[in-house]
Image: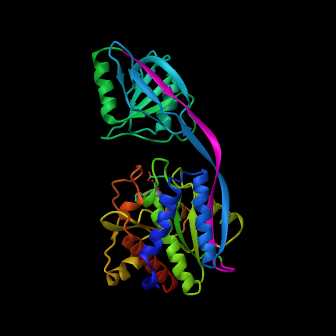
Amino acid sequence: MASLVDGDQAYRHLLVLAEGIGSRPAGTSAERQAAQYISQQLTTYGYQTQVQDFSFEYYVEETPALEVVPPTPLSLNPHALRLSAGGEVTAELVPAGLGRPQDFPLEGLKGRIALIERGELSFSDKVTNAAAAGAAAVVIYNNVEGPLRGDLQEESTIPALSLSQAEGLQLQALLAEGPLTVHLFAQSTQETRTSQNVIARSPQDDCQFIVGAHYDSVAAGPGANDNASGSATLLEMARVLDLRGQEEGVCFVAFGAEEVGLFGSRHFLATLASQGRPVPQAMVNLDMVGVGAEWQLMGSPDLVEKIDEGAAALGLDPVPTEPRLNTDHLSFMEAGIPAILIHRFEDPRYHTESDRAEFVEPQLLEEAAKLAFLALAGLASP
Ligand code: BES
Ligand code: ZN
């Protein structure tokens, strides 16, 4: 069946998603339009297709601000920690070590803003400790090179921003010279949005094996490689399987709202469980398969092996890598279902406005489908 796969057919779907529709942020009408296109295609191939709606909590983050006020004005580039309280504070900045109680001044933090280094304690513990000591806000800076973004475990009572290591050390250096007053602003609102998964089952079939790909994108760009590439490959696989008369037990699922927290794949699994449907035996995730120099396989070692065995015959040489990427196969692995991510490393335009169709190679979509078919073949004949 792998020989029937056609990269150019897959690329046509990619053009519809990434150019025809464009950016497809979770919960928007563009995302829904993409779901409808995917659903229509799958129906045309003869599958029973379902659009499965779900709601999720979306954080809308205003751009946060952190400025040192005159006489030495300096504007920094903070991020808000997810679940940070909103607020606007102008107060003295005080060094507060790692955010342990013993790191704070004896008199407490008294309405001041605590500057804390990342490490040892969770972000939430640092913020809770500082709030208990009377801080009005917290700024946490990275303890390794680069910017810092992170999540709190629960909503904080005071604003909490993060900074790169370089900017954190810059503030520490200024503090060593004398007191500093800073102005800090954070605001986020939460709203309930609706997204959807598109599920294609062969007649009366439960999903023993799942081929999945998310079809939403970030707002910054049209998400041609991330992840119209995986969705287009999924559609081409569905076409080829149908040509062969629909394989037993294979379902195709295009996931919504991946980019904001793997909501689609989590909802899909929760629904399987609540409907008492059987637990799938394995999942193959296609995410970012159209750009880059090398095939990488990540996930359950058994599945990695199944692909590895057949790949050489196709002239492909995928490299098993450490599980580190955050995408929908993780939802399955967390649920105890063997899963694998097939992706191509590395895309320099990841999550930017230039993640466009012109940079995606149709040949790679074809190879991705062939690798995914190897996994399915290996699973069908263990
Ligand atoms: N497509 C990416 C994950 C990815 C990166 C796959 C590189 C293959 C190669 C995914 O859409 C993404 O950006 N995930 C986020 C996390 C998500 C839960 C918000 C990430 O990795 O930061
Ligand atoms: Zn992605």
Which stretch did the figure color magenta? 180-205
At 69% from the left and 80% from the top, the residue drawn is 204
Place of residue 49 in the rendered image (x, y in percent of width and height, measured from the top left): 66, 71
In the rendered image, the residue lying farthest to the front is: 20
Confirm whether the magenta stretch covers residue 202: yes
Q: Is residue 226 above or below residue 108?
A: below
Colour pattern of the rendering: rainbow
Place of residue 182 in the rendered image (x, y in percent of width and height, measured from the top left): 41, 19
In the image, taking residue 353 as reference, residue 196 lies left or right, namely right
Confirm whether the magenta stretch covers residue 15: no
The image quarter in which residue 172 lies: top left
At 40% from the left and 55% from the top, the residue drawn is 355
In the rendered image, the residue lying farthest to the top is: 71
In the image, taking residue 371 as reference, residue 261 lies left or right, namely right
Quadrant of the displayed image that contains ligand 1? bottom left
The image quarter in which residue 292 lies: bottom left
At 66% from the left and 55% from the top, the residue drawn is 54
Nearest to the observer: residue 12 or residue 329: 12
Place of residue 143 in the rendered image (x, y in percent of width and height, measured from the top left): 33, 38
Answer whether residue 50 is visible to the viewer in this image. yes
The image quarter in which residue 3 lies: bottom left
Q: Is residue 377 above or below residue 215?
A: below
Place of residue 230 in the rendered image (x, y in percent of width and height, measured from the top left): 47, 66
Q: Is residue 19 above or below residue 338?
A: above
At 57% from the left and 72% from the top, the residue drawn is 252
In the image, taking residue 356 as reference, residue 169 lies left or right, namely left
